Amino acid sequence: MLGSVIPIALGLVTAAVAMSFWRLLCGPSMPDRILALDTLYINAIALLMLLGIHLGSALFFEAALLIALMGFIGTVALCKYLLRGDIIE
Amino acid sequence: MLEYLLSFLILTGATLTFIGSLGLLRFKDFYMRLHGPTKATTLGVGSLLIASALFFSSRNVGISLHEILITVFLVITAPVSAHLLAKAALHLNLHSFAKMPAKSTKREEGTDDDAMDTQTPEEKSSSSDTDVPRKPV
Amino acid sequence: MARLLPHPILSPTLACLWLLLVNSITPGQVFLGLLLGWMIPLLTLSFWPEAVTIRKPLTLLRYIGLLLIDIIMANFTVARLILGDPDRLKPIFVELPLDLTSDLAISLLANSITLTPGTVSARLSEDRRYLLVHALNETDPDALIATIKRRYERPLQEIFELC
């Protein structure tokens, strides 16, 4: 059961990554691109967790945690840049 | 039994993640696109993480709950980044299909206030005369 | 007491966070977690100017439960809207007058609004009395404001501000 569900889920998440990437490439404005980047981070966490279940390895947890932390900080820094024109004042 | 629950969680999570990104692709203006990733993707990844926690708890000796940490972190941070993105978009005057309330446009000119700021009012008033919001170059 | 343990809610939270992070509950890790939960608030005291007081813990628990149910419902609402015809949606900006005054309560309200059906909080006005909310598909702004005030603002006000 799990063996057949995980490839389907991986396919769905990969399609999600492709759509976010499309928005990142041609999103008309800067906030669109930042939003796409944020979505890509979250999709990457989903991919890592699925791969972890697929391979039966808990090693991917640390990577997922780091991506979650760094993704949020990156989004906030980019938004601050758009709002103020500077990150560290 | 557990396997069915796991499969259900994984499929729901992947489908929600997919739908969130589909929203990013389909909607016409930025403020509408913001809705997809902040809600659907967050819960989708949340249910994938819970599936992972259940899976490793059932396989190894001892329970494995640390995936909950990422779920909680995502649920806390997703609205914050959505709020900041919406603020940035309003600051840049992005085109929107939704009408702005009339009185709001006047009052909000040049504001740079933030609900997520942890500054106390004194610090804010002392710093507000120095940091004038600037347009990005 | 107040000087040794300045944030009585933050300390146990940090200890739990540490235990989740190392993913084990051996006595040594519990001790280390409690130590970290005690040390970190002391060392970062100047970054946390105001102490958080929760006046009604039971209302807070009920609020969290309500929020979790609403988040799950919100997802299916938004998923249906995304899969439907995007041209038929009626997005709208709504200005929500705030009764809350404390920073924490306002940020929690903004977060709740973003996580629940079809609404994203976009901007707080400079005088902190209006919150600009973007709704994905809403025809009646007054009904939306009334719902938000009844469902989320009332409990938050009871938890953090009223005695």
Image: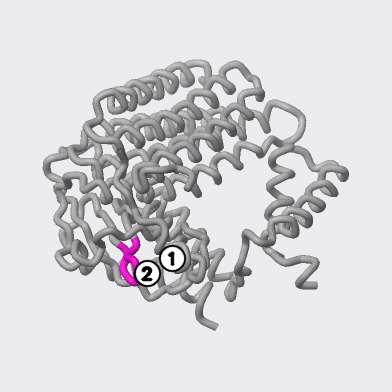
Q: In this view, does C92 lie above or below A14?
A: below
Tell me which colouring the rendered structure shows. one colour
**Image location of residue A48, percent across then percent down:** 53, 24
Q: Mark 1 lies on which chain?
A: C
The amino acid sitting under disc 1 is Ile
Dot 1 and dot 2 within a common chain? yes
The amino acid sitting under disc 2 is Arg
The local crowd at label 1, few if under 14, some if 14 to 19, many if 20 or more residues have their Cα within 10 Å, is many
Q: Give the range drawn in magenta.
A: C124-131
Q: Quadrant of residue A40?
A: top left
Q: In this view, does B77 lie above or below C94?
A: above
Q: Mark 2 points at which residue?
A: C128
Q: Distance between the residues labelled 1 and 2?
A: 9 Å
Residue positioned 53% across, 73% down in the render = C160
**Image location of residue B23, percent across then percent down:** 27, 35
Of the 4 image quadrants, the one containing the N terminus of chain C is bottom right
**Image location of residue B105, percent across then percent down:** 19, 61
Q: Is residue A22 visible?
A: yes
Q: Quadrant of residue A58?
A: top right
Residue positioned 32% across, 58% down in the render = C123
**Mark 2 and mark 1 in contact (Cβ < 8 Å)?**
yes
